[in-house]
Image (cartoon, grey):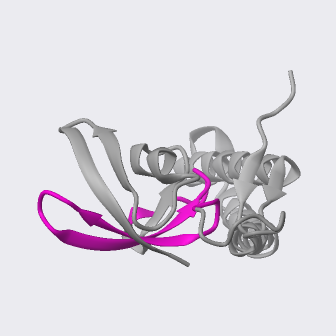
């Protein structure tokens, strides 16, 4: 079965590459040093330091493998690379929306689920709001089906 493509902005791709490089060049050495120090303590059959270091090594290698897989299956999406309408909401765009009921305005960047980070106002294209606004333009009102019910948003701006 083919792996699902992971949609990333160039910035998101670069961050994953940087994280992978750090894990391979820094964290692997740190864990290796921990293992050496634990082995130097003597009998590894009853050595909790050794067990902890081996477990950390396993987790690290799992994370490295997962990152490599994400990068291998990633597709970098360029904003408006297809020459489409500049006013339509597409992947990688920054949009400003207003909650109609509460008159609250928020600004979000529409990204793939791998890059989504609500603390940085990056929402997934698969989220309720993300999937509701994709393909829309400024001035439109969308209904977002959320766990609390239907929320209406007005799209104020598309960058």
Instruction: Please say if 77 is above or below 4.
Output: below
Q: Residue at x 76, y 72 (%)?
A: 10
Q: Position of residue 132 (x, y in %)?
A: 45, 46
Residue 124 left/right relative to 7: left
Instruction: Name the outermost residue toward the left.
Output: 102
Q: Nearer the viewer, residue 121 or 128?
A: 128
115 relative position to 118: left or right? right
Residue at x 40% of width, y 58% of height: 140
> Going by the image, does 149 lie left or right of 4?
left
Is 157 situated above or below 110? Answer: below
Outermost residue, front direction?
139
**Residue at x 64%, y 67% (from the top left corner):** 92
Whether the magenta-drawn stretch holds residue 20 is answered as no
Number of disc labels: 0
Position of residue 49 measured from the top left corner of the image (x, y, whole percent): 56, 54
Residue 75 image point, x, y percent: 82, 55
Residue 92 falls inside the magenta stretch: yes
Kindly indicate the quadrant of the structure image that contains residue 21.
bottom right
Q: Which residues are magenta?
A: 89-118
**Quadrant position of residue 26:** bottom right
The residue nearer to you, when weighing 130 against 120, is 130
Q: Is residue 57 left or right of residue 117?
A: right
Tell me the quarter of the picture where residue 34 sits: bottom right
Locate the N terminus by quadrant.
top right
Question: x, y (%) of residue 130?
Answer: 48, 51
Quarter holding the C terminus is bottom right
Q: Residue at x 76, y 66 (%)?
A: 20
Vertical placement of 112 versus 95: above or below? above
């Amino acid at each position: 079965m083919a792996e699902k493509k992971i949609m990333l902005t160039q910035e998101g791709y670069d961050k994953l590459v940087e994280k992978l490089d750090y894990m391979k060049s820094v964290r692997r050495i740190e864990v290796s040093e921990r293992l050496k120090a634990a082995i130097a303590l003597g009998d590894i059959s009853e050595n909790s330091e050794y067990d902890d270091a081996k477990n950390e090594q396993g987790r690290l290698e799992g994370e490295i493998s997962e990152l490599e897989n994400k990068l291998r299956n990633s597709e970098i999406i360029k904003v408006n690379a297809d020459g489409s309408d500049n006013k339509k909401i597409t992947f990688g765009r920054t949009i400003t929306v207003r909650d109609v009921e509460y008159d609250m305005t928020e600004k979000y960047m529409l990204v793939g689920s791998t890059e989504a980070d609500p603390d940085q106002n990056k929402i997934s294209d698969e989220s309720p709001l993300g999937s509701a606004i994709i393909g829309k333009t400024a001035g439109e009102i969308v209904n977002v089906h959320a766990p609390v019910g239907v929320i209406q948003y007005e799209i104020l701006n598309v960058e």
